[in-house]
Image: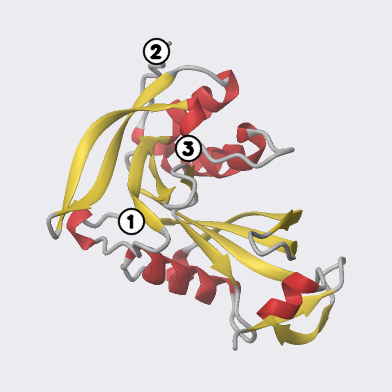
Amino acid sequence: MEYLDIYDESGNHLGKEDRNIVHKDALWHNTVHCWLYDQEGNIYFQIRKEEQKLYTTASGHVKAGESIKEGFGREIEEEIGIKVDYDKAVFVNIYKFIMDKKKKDGSLFRDRAFSNVYVCSFEGSYDDFNFDEEELTGLVKINAKQTLELLKKENGKIKGTVIKKESDKNIAKEQDIEFKNFLVNKGETAIDKYGDVLKKVIELTSKKGTIQINITK
């Protein structure tokens, strides 16, 4: 049984509750959206297994009694198999996320989350990644500036590096990344969903100089 801290809509702590009850009764709780970037201005998106779309580097619930940054480190390790100095993670923003959807068994999944978004620098090797194959099929490394322009334009494609496990080894291949490849839920826009984190990575790596924007139709 997994317990989550629960809150009112204003963020006042109310106690803790079983995760299943949290989503049954639409109780407010914390999640963490974890992003890795490098000092060349690139950001890592995971390829979500279920949707085969690009999403956060890693993400999930913050457990009861766990700090947001502790949740950041745990989710990164669980989903992509690396340890990071989560104390160095940089805050981006907190968003209120509300979604109700029917599950395959007909029950209603009710989500009321404070989505805490953080970024952390990563300078390791592709070989360091050990993907949770239940959650994702790999990672995509793409330039944050180019991605921001692509999402603003809502059309076109840019070059990215796709990292997947093949024959027990991580293989990196250059591939076109299109606007339609990004995970966006009903009622959302890509620029609203990912714009702030891309801007934060650009801000943190701007000292590296100007990178040419190249989006093709």
Q: Which mark is residue 216?
A: 2
Pick the residue in front: 203 or 98: 98
| Residue labelled with disc 1 | 122
Dot 2 and dot 3 residues touching (CB under 8 Å): no
At label 1, the amino acid type is Phe
Pick the residue in front: 134 or 121: 134
Helix, strand or loop at label 1? It is loop
Q: CA distance from mark 1 to mark 2?
A: 28 Å
Q: Where's residue 63, x and y in %?
A: 60, 80
Q: CA distance from mark 2 to mark 3?
A: 21 Å
Q: Which mark is residue 200?
A: none
Residue under the point 17% across and 47% down = 171
Residue under the point 20% across and 37% down = 173
Residue under the point 55% across and 38% down = 199
Helix, strand or loop at label 2? It is loop
Mark 1: few, some, or many residues within 10 Å (few <14, many ≥20)?
some
At label 3, the amino acid type is Ile
Which one is in front in this view, the residue at disc 1 or the one at disc 2? 2
Which one is in front in this view, the residue at disc 2 or the one at disc 3? 2
| Residue labelled with disc 3 | 202
